[in-house]
Image (tube, rainbow, N blue to C red):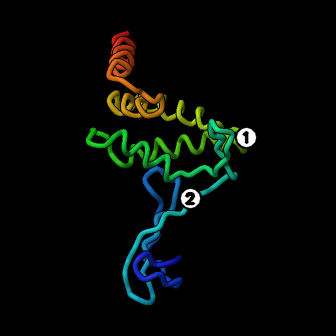
Amino acid sequence: MRCPFCGNDASQVKDSRPTEDGAAIRRRRQCEACAARFTTFERIQLRELWVLKSESRREPFDREKLLRSVAIATRKRPVEQAQIERLVSGIQRQLETTGDGEVPAQRIGEMVMDALKGLDSVAYIRFASVYKDFREARDFEEFAGNVAEVGRE
C-alpha cells in the first residue's frame, strides 16, 4: 500500500479489525520509510459495476463519489458518519447483487433519495435539489411541500 505522505510502496499492517457494519476491514498501517501511520479500508467487491450516464457514457462505479454526495447532503445534520457508511454500503450491495453489471445513474439517484427520505428530510431535499436540477426557489418550494405532505400522512 502506497504511503499517502511520502509515496513509499512498503507499509506494515499494525492493526486490523472489521468496520461497525462488517462490510469492510479497517487496517492501521505504518510506512516503512517515513514511519507515518495511516488507515486503509478493504471491501468485498462482488462484481465490476458500470454506471450508465444520461449522455450514453459509461464509467466505473465509484463508491467514494457516492459517499461524498451523501456526505454533502447530510452536512451539518444530525446524521452520523456510520449511518452514511451503512447507507452507501447498502446501496452498493443492492447494486452488486442485482445481476446487472451496468446500472443507470438515474437508478442510483433514486436509491439514494429513497434511503435519505427515511434518514433525514433536509438531506433528502438537498440531494434532490442537485439530482433533480432545481433551477429556481419555486422548485424547492414545490418539492419541500410534497415532502411535508408525505410526512403528515
Which of the 4 quarters of the picture holds residue 125? top left
Residue 37, position as x, y percentages in the image: 38, 77
Q: Are marks 2 and 1 in contact (CB under 8 Å)?
A: no
- What SS does tag 1 mark? loop
* Rendered residue at 49%/46% (across/down): 66
- What SS does tag 2 mark? strand
Residue 148, position as x, y percentages in the image: 33, 15
Taking 148 as reference, is 22 above or below it? below
Which of the 4 quarters of the picture holds residue 55? top right
* Rendered residue at 42%/81% (across/down): 30
Residue 151, position as x, y percentages in the image: 35, 16
Q: Give left or right: position of 40 versus 142.
A: right
Tag 2: residue type?
Arg
Q: Rounded to the nearest whole Å, what is the CA distance between mark 2 and mark 1?
A: 19 Å
Taking 125 as reference, is 145 above or below it? above
Badge 1: few (under 14), some or many (20 or more) residues near its Cα, within 10 Å?
few
Residue tagged 2:
43
**Mark whose residue sits in front, 2 or 1:** 1
Tag 1: residue type?
Asp
Residue 50, position as x, y percentages in the image: 67, 47
* Rendered residue at 36%/11% (across/down): 149
Count of marks placed on residues: 2
Residue tagged 1:
100
Q: Quadrant of the C terminus?
A: top left
